[in-house]
Image (tube, rainbow, N blue to C red):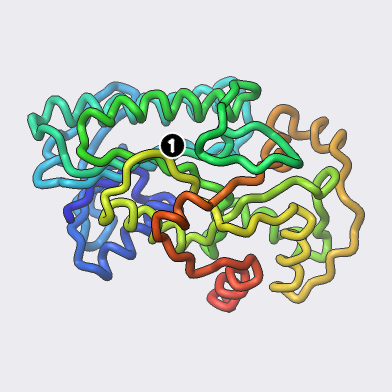
Amino acid sequence: MKLLITGATGLIGSSIIENTQKNDIKVHYLTTRKSKINSIPGAIGFLWNPSTQEIDIQCFDGVDTIIHLAGASISKRWTSKNKKEIFDSRVFSTQLLKKGLEDSGTGKIKTIICASAIGIYPNSFHETFTEKNKILNENYLQEIVIAWEKESRKLSSLAANFSIIRIGLVLSARGGLLSKLALPVKLMAGSAFGSGNQWQSWIHISDLTLLFLHCATNNWKGLFNAVSPNPITQLELIKEIGKALNRPVFLPNIPSFILKFFLGERSILVLGSQKISAQLILKKGFSFQFLSLDSALREIYDKKR
């Protein structure tokens, strides 16, 4: 396999590259900064600019697999400017990837895998969502992901195997949402948000990394949820973080109205509830290293100690 990856320096991309280096997989990556062209040992960087639709088409030389992860963080404040960046970074980068691949004259490649997010599913405290569920555009998160997937599907004609991976809450020692949830717990100020009954569909970064590579090496096609088979409620998540950090969680939940007042539309990131099924990837033979939240958190915090 020779891999081209976008979003290579992000949480997921950097983990995938670490794994490929251990398995002697050649890697090309795209970056918007000249200073980062030689920043990843053992990989070759190429410049692109989704805003101006410019790309170095040499990035496709010899590549048979593309993993497309690029997209600005949704955790920043949702100002009009930031919301536009979040949207454009996903849609424009996908458009440019398609244009570059067509202009390169490479023809149809073996595999393209595009990242997506479980934020595309509706909010529900009772329903379990599968890849077959009908999607409605009911909030800003869904609007982003629907547009993202729409552009991603246009890449399907350029690969023998095309898939979209809808990613859940990624648990990692290197950052992401877990570090934000864990900080108040460390300071003895941990509490759940709203009712605490929101479903959190999570996945350990190691399992997510292996899932992308498993998808590539086994020629998967279609739409897949990247979540553990064992979702938990947010209150349970906060309590498990407390156990892993040897900190009590005793404060009352933060009321929803306070979160909505301070976070506005962005409060959906902590008040949203999505119970997502992992049955499809299990049926296709994927094996999780971390099936329980307890084992996932122990691995993360043991690594930090």
Query: x%, y% of residue 264?
Result: 75, 29
Q: Residue at x 33, y 57 (%)?
A: 214
Query: x%, y% of residue 27?
Result: 21, 54
Which is more toward the observer, 210 or 128?
Answer: 128
Q: Residue pushed farthest front?
A: 283
Three-letter code for the amino acid on which mark 1 is drawn = Gly
- Number of marks present in the image shown: 1
**Among the 4 quarters of the image, the one containing residue 17:** bottom left
What residue does disc 1 label? Answer: 71
Q: Residue at x 70, y 60 (%)?
A: 183
Task: For the C terminus, give its image quadrant.
Answer: bottom right
Q: Is residue 232 above or below residue 115?
A: below
Q: Is residue 253 above or below residue 269?
A: below
* Residue 35 appears in view: no
Q: Is residue 278 above or below residue 119?
A: below
User: Is residue 98 toward the left or the right of residue 184 in the image?
Assistant: left
Secondary structure beneath label 1: loop
Task: For the N terminus, give its image quadrant.
Answer: bottom left
Q: Residue at x 11, y 30 (%)?
A: 104
Query: x%, y% of residue 109?
Result: 16, 39
Which is more toward the observer, 279 or 217?
Answer: 279
Query: x%, y% of residue 287?
Result: 44, 65
Q: Residue at x 28, y 57 (%)?
A: 40
Which is more toward the observer, 43 or 238?
Answer: 238
